[in-house]
Structures are given as C-alpha cells and as structure tokens.
Amino acid sequence: MDSIRQAFELLFSFDKELWQIIGVTMRMSFFSTTISCLIGLPLGALLGTKQFKAKSFIKKTVHTLMGLPPVVAGLLVYTLFTHYGPFGKLNLLFTVEVMVIAQVVLITPIVIGLSSSFIEGSSKPVIETARGLRLSKSKTLFLCISEGRTSLFSVVLSAFGRSIAEVGAVSIVGGNIQWKTRVMTTAIMLETNKGKFSFALALGIILLLIAFIVNALASFIVKDKKA
Amino acid sequence: MKKVLAILLVAVMLFSFAACGSNKNETTAASGETTAATTPENAVIRLSTTTSVNDSGLLPYLLPTFEKETGYKVEVQSAGTGAAIQKAEDGNADLILVHAKQSEEEFIEKGFGVERLPFMYNYFVIVGPKNDPAGIKDCKDAASAFAKIQASGSSFVSRGDDSGTHKAELKIWGEGKAPDASKDKWYVSAGKGMGDCLNMASEMNAYCLTDKATFLSMQKDLNLDLLLEKGEDMKNTYSLIAVNPEKVDGVNTEGAKALIDWMLGDEASKLIADYGQEEYGVSLFTLLEK
C-alpha cells in the first residue's frame, strides 16, 4: 500500500531524474522493438509460408533462441563491444545504442518464432487466393503479414513487453549509469540492492503503468484503422 | 520408440533424485562423526553481509572451519551494506557483518541491533589508468587525490548504490561537495557492485575507489593499477552486530552469539590475519587491537 502511494507521489512530483529514466526506457524499448520487428516479421513470414529442407532445424534453433537467457545475450554483446573486442573501436559500450543491440539479439528470435507460428496457422487460404490472383512472391508475403496483422500485433506487443521489462542484458552492456543508461528495470534493481524495497516496488508500479498505457494506445490505434 | 524414450527420461530423472537423496545422507553422517553429536537445536545461522567480505573469498575461507567445529550451518546473503541492513530489519537475518559506521549506529539506535563490535579493518585504495593522467600517485590522502582527479577532468566511476564503499567515497568528497552526475560528465554514477564498477573503470580508463580485496582478486583481468593506498581517510572498518531478538521475531540468538564468539576468538583471528598471504603476498584484513 505504501508503495502504491509512493508511486503516485513520485509520478506527480515530476522528479527530473525519474522522467529522464522513463525517457531512456521508452527510447530503448521503442528502437529495440521496431528493429526486431523489421528483421523478425519478414523472416517469420518466410519461415511460416515456405517449405524447404532445413526448415525443421531452423525452427528448432529459433525456438531455442527464444529462451536465450538475457544475461547470455548481454555477455555476448559485451564481449563484442568491449575495449579490446572486435567492435571496441566504435566506443559503444555503456551507451543506449548498445543496449538496443543487445535487446535486438534477445527479441528478434521471439518475433520470428511467434510470427512464424501465427502465419503458418493462418496463411493457407491467403496463399491460395494470392496464387489465384497471380501475385508475385514478395507481394504474397506482404499479404500474409497484413492479413494476420491482428495476431502479429500481439507479437509486436510481446516484443515490446520483453524489451521494457528486461534487466539482465541491459544491465551488463548499459552499465546502469545515472543520467545516461539507467532504465526503469536497472533503477529497480539498484533500489533493491540499496535495501529500499518499498521505493523499488513503487518504481515497479510505475513501470507497469507505462506498459499499460502503451498497450492501450497501441490497441486504440489498431482498432481505429479497422473501423 | 517414443514410449521407450519417455520411460528412459523418467528413469533418468528418478535416478538423479535418488542420487541426491543418498548424497545428503552421506554428508550428514560425515558431519555427525566430526562434531561428535553436538549439532545444535537451531542449526542454521543467517548472516547478512556486504559483497566485499563474501566476494573477496574471506567468508568461504573462514566459515567451513566454524561449521565443522560447531555443527552450525551458516547461510550467507551478500548485498550492498544498505540492503544487508534492511534484510536484517525485515527479520531475514540473525546477524550482520558490514562496514558503514553511521548506518550501523542507526541500526542499533532503532533497536534492531544489540551491540556494534568492530573487529577488523583494511584500507580502501584508489585504482586508475596505468599512465595516471591526473597524477595522484604521490598524494598523501584520498581527499587530495580526488581534488586532482576533479581538476584534471579524468573519468571517475562511483558505486552510486548507497553501499559502504559509496558512503566512504561521499565522505571523502566532503559534505555536499560530491560531484553532480547530472552535470559533471566525468563523474560516472554506476549504481552497481564493486566488481562491475572495476570492469567499467577499466573499460572507460577511469579512476575508482575500491576495497583492496576485490581489486586484487580481479587485477589480472583489469587494465588498472593500484595508485594510492593507506591515506588516513581511507580506513575501512568492519563490524559484527547481532540482531536484537526483542525487536525482531524468529532470530537465532544462540547461533548468532556462537558465530560472533568464534569470529572474535583466537583461531579466527589467526585465520583472518593469514588470509591473502598465500595468494597475493599481503594480508587483506587486519585485526583491530582488542
């Protein structure tokens, strides 16, 4: 109860640091979701509609990567971007950019896996229609994605949910630096480590509120289009 | 084929359960022999402590001896000093081992702790890039080194997590004089544990205030040198405090007392004084005069 009160007090006190953290969180989640979907949805559609030799192997790999532990994704990206690593020259470690990269590694398999299952289940009539209309291959693929958009919309939201709630990977590559790479989840982690449990919980409530607002806005927009 | 596989899988799982079970029996039998049937009634002691004494390897080095001699089992939870104390206040620990005098005194004032027993110390050290761009090597204490780092604009990684080390750092900057991370870009407030901060300092060519034990245990993987130690303002004292059973429910008072008595006793003192000699050629902790 104390935490709920604290959460609202914090929100309405317009604390500069809190809003900066929310800003970084939104920027990071938005870009990681967008990039993963740009890569993942077409690949998912391909995997869902095409028949080819290594399909079952690729599907198993994708499903395994869907369970990739965030810490492992973080470590992987860390070793790539560390000072003496292959991309060390770019000086990207401990920036929001590299946090997005780590999350793309983490989320893209989820987008591919979920969207391919959805499309696989719903694409047959679409493909037949497309064949009847003699549409090109890329147009058929686009039609599959656009016909399944309601279910694919939930894929995008899952990706966003994963991105905004994730702590392991962004903590390793971002470093939780105040005023720079601190996001809601790493801030919650920090307050927990400080022993300020009720304040940490208040931040958690704010994070849930943000996620709810984003979900509500997104479904509002989608419904609008349908009508 | 599928059925056979399923049965095999179940069999393997059952076998592994059985293996765990028999292992347990063996260990209890073994400890039963060595402790000559003196296993105490409430055998679990919950010790809430800071990362520096656990991650440096001190507790894993000391506690097996204590457990063997007394039959107690110590469950160590390590976190920053702030969280370590909070856990004890929430009734999740029997005693604490921490290093932040002011927080310790508050803990006792609020009635959660019985008595503060300072028993060992070491020095915080300042580590930094090997070429020492701010030139702090010959400073006489941490305060003057910090002033030089600030003037040179070299990066500095701060724990920023309310831990004992963070509080010590703020004290060295002086009341209200700590840099403001929102404006001073060279001052990096990481909000992370000691090991993470050292890695970060190494990546960023930055300075960092750390306990010596953690630095030595990680040194070979870091691009950092030990630049300053043993300034008067860098002393780091560790204390034991038993949780007050009158204020907190379910405390294992006898267990806490047994562990405190043992830690302050001659055998543990000798073990602590020797710790680090073999691996690093220096003692990592020094006992306070009794």
Image: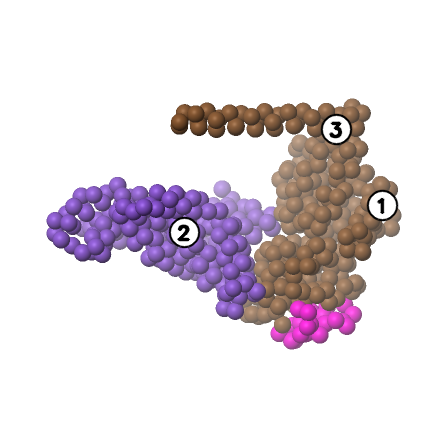
Chain colours: A purple, B brown
- Kind of residue indicated by mark 2: Ile
Residue that mark 2 sits on: A107
Q: What is the chain identity of the residue bearing mark 3?
A: B
Q: Is residue B35 magenta?
A: no
Name the residue located 77 percent from the left edge and 33 percent from the top edge: B68
Q: Quadrant of residue B86?
A: top right
Residue that mark 1 sits on: B270
Specify whether A205 is left or right of A224.
right
Is residue B146 shown to the viewer in this render? yes
Q: What is the chain identity of the residue bearing mark 1?
A: B
Task: Give the vertical position of B86 relative to B38 (above or below).
Answer: below
| Disc with the residue nearer the chain's start (1 vs 3) | 3
Residue at disc 2, secondary structure: helix
Specify whether B160 is left or right of A25.
right
Query: Of A140 and A192, which appears nearest the observer?
Result: A140
Which label sits on residue B164? none
Please tell me whether mark 1 or mark 3 is closer to you in this view: 3
- Kind of residue indicated by mark 3: Ser
Specify whether B289 is left or right of B8.
right
Residue found farthest to the bottom: B152
- Kind of residue indicated by mark 1: Lys
Q: Which residues are magenta?
A: B129-153
Q: Residues within 10 Å of mark 2 (few under 14, many from 20)?
A: many
Residue that mark 3 sits on: B31
Where is residue B266 shown, x and y percent of the image? Answer: 86, 42
